[in-house]
Image (cartoon, grey):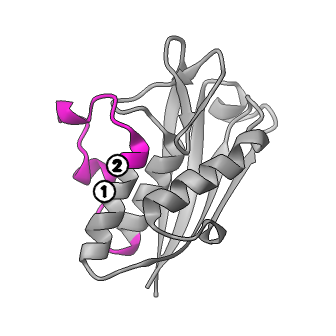
């Protein structure tokens, strides 16, 4: 068994959609990035790739490649899982935390878990997602951005 850790952060910006775990959330701001900037999918992708010693999402999907402009991060995650499974690994479980002051994310977490499980080819019981605020502290607490941490166990 191997474990990987992933972390991602994106700035919040007007005129962008807010997508987390493949779920579009109604909000006044969205995450800025080359793809759809889904910090949750990016952190999970990094955790999966890291567990297999295959680098990170930036190596697999460089932001200098225009074919990934506005890409669906659930599809990028699905590709990362295929790359790792081609090396002989399977995902055992995923645990992730989204760090955001607003909006409240609890109503969307079950759908995020379903989307992540589907992209990873695992049962939804193998995916746990949590959300927390930073009590008004730091860049996420000030509403400037969002971050996500993830760990993934592979076998």
In the rendered view, tell whether residue 44 sits above or below residue 101: below
Residue 81 on image: x %, y %: 36, 64
Residue 132 is inside the magenta segment:
no
Residue 118 on image: x %, y %: 49, 59
Mark 2: secondary structure: helix
Residue 66 is inside the magenta segment:
yes
Residue depicted at x 55% and y 23%: 30
Q: Which residue is mark 2?
A: 76
Kindly check if marks 2 and 1 are in contact, taking CB atoms under 8 A apart as contact: yes
Residue 135 in view (yes/no) = yes
Residue depicted at x 78% and y 34%: 104
Residue depicted at x 45% and y 63%: 120
> Horizontal placement of 133 versus 149: left or right?
right
Closer to the camera, 11 or 119? 119
In the rendered view, tell whether residue 147 sits above or below residue 57: above
Tell me where the magenta segment starts and ends, as one range.
Answer: 51-75
Q: Residues within 10 Å of mark 2 (few under 14, many from 20)?
A: many
Q: Which residue is mark 1?
A: 79
On the image, which quarter does residue 62 sit in? top left
Residue 73 on image: x %, y %: 41, 43
Residue depicted at x 33% and y 52%: 57
Numbered circle sitting on residue 114: none
């Amino acid at each position: 068994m191997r474990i990987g850790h992933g972390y991602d952060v994106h700035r919040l910006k007007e005129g962008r959609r807010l997508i987390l775990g493949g779920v579009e959330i109604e909000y006044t701001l969205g995450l800025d990035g080359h793809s759809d900037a889904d910090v949750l999918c990016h952190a999970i992708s990094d955790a999966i790739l890291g567990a297999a010693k295959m680098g990170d999402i930036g190596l697999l999907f460089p932001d200098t490649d225009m074919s990934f402009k506005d890409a669906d991060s659930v599809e990028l995650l699905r590709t990362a899982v295929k790359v790792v499974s081609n090396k002989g690994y399977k995902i055992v479980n995923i645990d992730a935390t989204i760090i955001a002051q607003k909006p409240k994310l609890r109503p969307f977490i079950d759908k995020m878990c379903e989307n992540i499980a589907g992209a990873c080819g695992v049962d939804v019981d193998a995916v746990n997602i949590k959300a927390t605020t930073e009590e008004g502290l730091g860049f996420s607490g000030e509403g400037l951005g969002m971050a996500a941490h993830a760990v993934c166990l592979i076998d």
